[in-house]
Image (cartoon, rainbow, N blue to C red):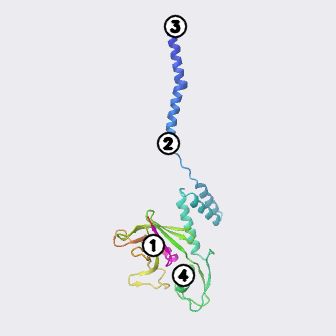
Amino acid sequence: MALALLAVSGVGVYYIWEKMIFPERELEKKIVEIRQQKKKKIDHGAQTYREAVALFSTGALRGGLGKLHELMKFYPDSQYYPEAKRVVGEINVDRLLSKLPAPGKHEYIVKGGDSLVRIAQNEQSTVGYVMHVNGRMGAGLQKGDQLIVSPLNFSILISLSARTLTLMTEEGNFFKEYSMVHYKIPPNSSSQFDTMIKALVVGSGDALVPVGSSQFVAAKKELRCERRGVPIRAALPDSDGNNYITGFFLDSSDLEELALIVRPGMKVHVRK
């Protein structure tokens, strides 16, 4: 009887272990493992980006842009956010620098006594913009000439931490972002300040090039601010290691583009 009771007890213990205790412990282990696993982050902007690409592929430029703007507004954490900003910026500038219709862009008929400088000032534009859009290499104008002009009303936001320079529209909307190669703030200067564009300097040293001349397009350019020591200039091979050269340094092609659409009086906001 003792052996029989021992056998029954052994079977009972085995049954309890196999059917109750062991499965429960295995379940607890799996729960711990699941909790330790990194949760897969859902990219809510992915679908919007795919919809934008699909619209672009069918030629629906406005619809595709609308989707990218939606992504930028609602899904800033999306992995597609940087690409959306890049595409929107490229399209914005391409439309602005072409003869294609765009808000504010219109035709101007040259009058007697007009000059490129006067036209650019009156139209809130720049000489470089007028020359570029109309395919002109010099300042010569004749009465009756037809020019495409557009007001250029932007502000500039410079982020030191992100190393970006962003053009914002008059309404405060994103227009285009540029990457800074590097920057150097003058010693004892605040890392946060506001200033404005003072002038576009064309040429270098004593060899300044007249605005609107035939040498204007190929000449070196620099955007100077009201605040001294913080110009927007092209990055040179030795500028990063020279502590005496200060300012915000961009790729030369980006600076050439900015020189066309940034005009004196535009506000510049520098932030950490």
* Residue 111 position within the rendered picture, expressed as x and y whole percent measured from the top left: 60, 90
Residue where numbered disc 3 is placed: 1
Viewer can see residue 235? no
- Judging depth in this view, the residue of 169 and 110 nearest the camera is 169
* Residue span colored magenta: 257-270
Relative height, residue 203 to residue 15 (above, below): below
How busy is the neighbourhood of tag 3: few (under 14 within 10 Å), some, or many (20 plus)? few
Q: Residue furthest bottom?
A: 112
Mark 2 → mark 4, Cα distance in angstroms: 59 Å
Mark 1 → mark 3, Cα distance in angstroms: 98 Å
Q: Earlier in the sequence, mark 3 or mark 4?
A: 3
Q: Amino acid at mark 2?
A: Gln
Residue where numbered disc 2 is placed: 37
Quick one: SS at disc 4?
A: helix
How busy is the neighbourhood of tag 1: few (under 14 within 10 Å), some, or many (20 plus)? some
Tell me if label 3 and label 4 are in contact, CB under 8 Å.
no
- Residue 183: name its quadrant: bottom left
Q: Amino acid at mark 1?
A: Ser
* Residue 158 position within the rendered picture, expressed as x and y whole percent measured from the top left: 46, 68
Quick one: SS at disc 2?
A: loop
Q: Amino acid at mark 3?
A: Met
Residue where numbered disc 4 is placed: 131
Q: Residue furthest top?
A: 1
Q: Nearer the viewer, mark 2 or mark 4?
A: 2
Classify the position of the C terminus by image quarter: bottom left
